[in-house]
Structures are given as structure tokens and as C-alpha cells.
Amino acid sequence: MKKTIFGFVSLVIVIIGCAGSPQPVATTEINSGLLTLDQAIAEAATRIDERIMAGAKIAPLNFNSPHDRFSDYVLEELTANLVDSRKLTVVDRREIDLIRNEFDFQLSGEVGDDSMQQLGRMLGAQAIISGTFTDLGGFYRIMIRVLNVQNASVEVQYRANIANDNITSALLTGGRTATATQQRTTTAQASTAQVPTVPVAQTQVPATSVVQAPAPVQAPEPALANGTYTFRPRPQAYQGARAVNVFVDNIVVRSGYMTIYLRPVPQGESNYLNSVGRNWSDAGTILRDLDRPARSYTPLEGDIIERGFLGAWITFKDVTATRFSLTSAGSDPRMVFDEIQLGKPD
């Protein structure tokens, strides 16, 4: 009887011990729900294509990870997937780098939404892409989101857990790390802080020394003056080498919005129905800053008007250019205004 009771108590203790102690999870169970990095990027591109309006201009700006090689790979593969789908207009990475360098935008590490929105507007994009990387111990999580440039709303948010496979491991090995970048920045700041301030008259600077002035602060571009800009004579569009009956009548600027009015006659009122073509009101129309060719804009809206005003109108937002070209949507050759220059409003 004692042996029976002892055996029963031992069995209870073993059961309780097993229930109370955490058991290790097999590696195969952990990896069963993980994606490869390429699979996650492809899924993110599909999600973006599904959620963003066709023809919209989108800019892959920033992916924050411990290594620049990993960040570059994600942005380049995401760009390639979006370009292959041919649904959205994707800003070229070289154009992004050009504007970023010109205005000294830092896109490494944590970047605020305001800064990315500002850069997105300079690129003429309606949406921008950013992402983050998290090490979860044995596997990783990436998050990719799309931000509306105009109202800062999140249009797409994709997240996935990825396996630490050969590709991911290779991308996370070598290259510049965020920590190294921060250390270099801290060292540079410390070195600058140690330079004593001495009156120029008492100091002899060696010929080999280089004194670097602080980088100038980029002032915000002035907004266009509100009002109506009337053109006399009216600029005319060309299609290839052929002049076409499309003319800029006037441009109205108000509270950051620019509306361009087109007519089918070089002067006066239109007295016959002659549509200037719906291509001008399509999303594929492009306004390009001639002083900063890397900067372009696409219309918010547009339409053909045949009552009271025979022609078309197109509206853009946040245009700061005073000298620009205007290219219609549609198949080649497109209709083009080579140069439209704003003076002062009427």
C-alpha cells in the first residue's frame, strides 16, 4: 500500500513539473510560418499595387535597418517589383539621391514623417514608402508602409516575419551599420567641440589646414503669389514637331493650388466645339520644373469643359516652379508645352 501511494505521488509530481516548466520549441515549428525576404518584398509590392490608385507617383525613400546593404536591397527589389507591375509611376532611386544630396536630406536611421513628406513633395510624388527592421531573436520582422504625401495618412502597412536564411544573413554581414555611422558622427562632433575659439589676429593657420564653414541652412522655397496669371500671346502646345490647337489661356494660383486653363484657340473666346483632348486631364500629365529638372508634379484632378468655357483645366498642388514644361498623358508623341513662364499675377 505504501509503495502504491508513493508511486501515485511521484506520478503527480512528474505531471505537475512538466506542466509548470516551459518546453523548448523545435526550430522547424518556429520557421514554419516565416517567409523569405524576397517573398515578403513581393507580397508588400502586391499589397501596395492593390491599395494605391493606378497611375499615382510613388517614391521608395527609406528603410531603416542595422546595415545599409540590407536597406538598399529591400528598396531596390521593392522598386523592381513595382516597376514590373506597371500600375504605378515609381520615382527612380537616382532621382531621389539627386534631390536628397541637393537639399542635404539624411535618410539613414530614424527619419521623421515630416522630412519624408517634404522630400516626397519635391519629387512630385503622391505617396512615399518607408520601412523598419526588428530582430526578434532567430528571425526578423520587417514593416513596410506607404504614406500619403498630402495628408500624412497611412495608405498601406505591411508586416511579415522573415527567416534568417542565406540571403538575409549575407545582407546583414558587412557594410556600414547604423551604430558605426552614429559613432563617426559623435566622434566628429567631439573633435569639433575640442577646437578652441581664438581671435583671428592672434592665430596663424598653417597653409595645409582647411577651415570648413558650417553648411548653410536651406531656406524654404517661397510659395507662388496668389492670383490669376493671364498669357498674351497664349503659349501653344506641340505634338512631335507639329503645332496643335491647344493653348494656355491663364493660370490661377490660390492657397498652394495651381489650376491651368487650356483653350483650343490662340486668342479670344472659343466659338465652336473643339475639344483640346482628355489626355490633359489624365493622371499621366506631368508638370516639370525647368530650373530643377528632377522635380515634377502630377495633377490632383482635371476635366474638359464645354459649356461657358470650351477647353480643359488641370489642378496641381504645392508647385513652386515659375518656369516649367507641361506634358500630356497618352501615347507618344505626347502634346508638350516646352516652356511656360510665370511673371506676376494680373
Image: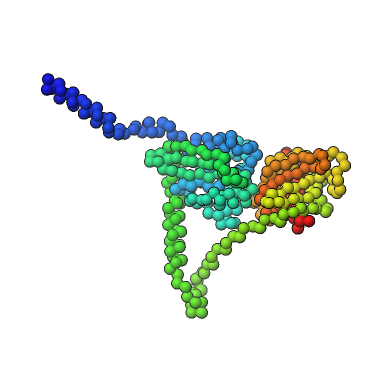
Q: Residue 48 falls in which quadrant of the image? A: top right
Report the coloring of the rendering: rainbow
Q: What percent of the width, then of the height, locates residue 219? A: 61, 60
Residue depicted at x 56% and y 51%: 114
Look at the image and tell me in which quarter the N terminus lies: top left
> Left or right of 83: which side holds 171?
left
**Is 211 located above or below residue 292 in the figure?**
below
Q: Residue furthest left?
A: 2
Q: What percent of the width, then of the height, locates residue 248? A: 79, 48
Q: What percent of the width, then of the height, locates residue 292? A: 66, 54
> Left or right of 330: which side holds 243?
right
Residue depicted at x 62% and y 58%: 220
**Is 20 located above or below residue 316 in the figure?**
above
> Left or right of 310: which side holds 158?
left
Residue depicted at x 81% and y 43%: 309
**Is 226 located above or below residue 157 in the figure?**
below
Q: What percent of the width, then of the height, locates residue 100? A: 57, 53
Q: Give the total number of marks visible in the rendering.
A: 0
Residue in front for this viewpoint, 3 or 68: 3
Q: Residue 7 falls in which quadrant of the image? A: top left
Residue depicted at x 80% and y 53%: 231
Look at the image and tell me in which quarter the C terminus lies: bottom right
Q: Is residue 141 visible?
A: yes
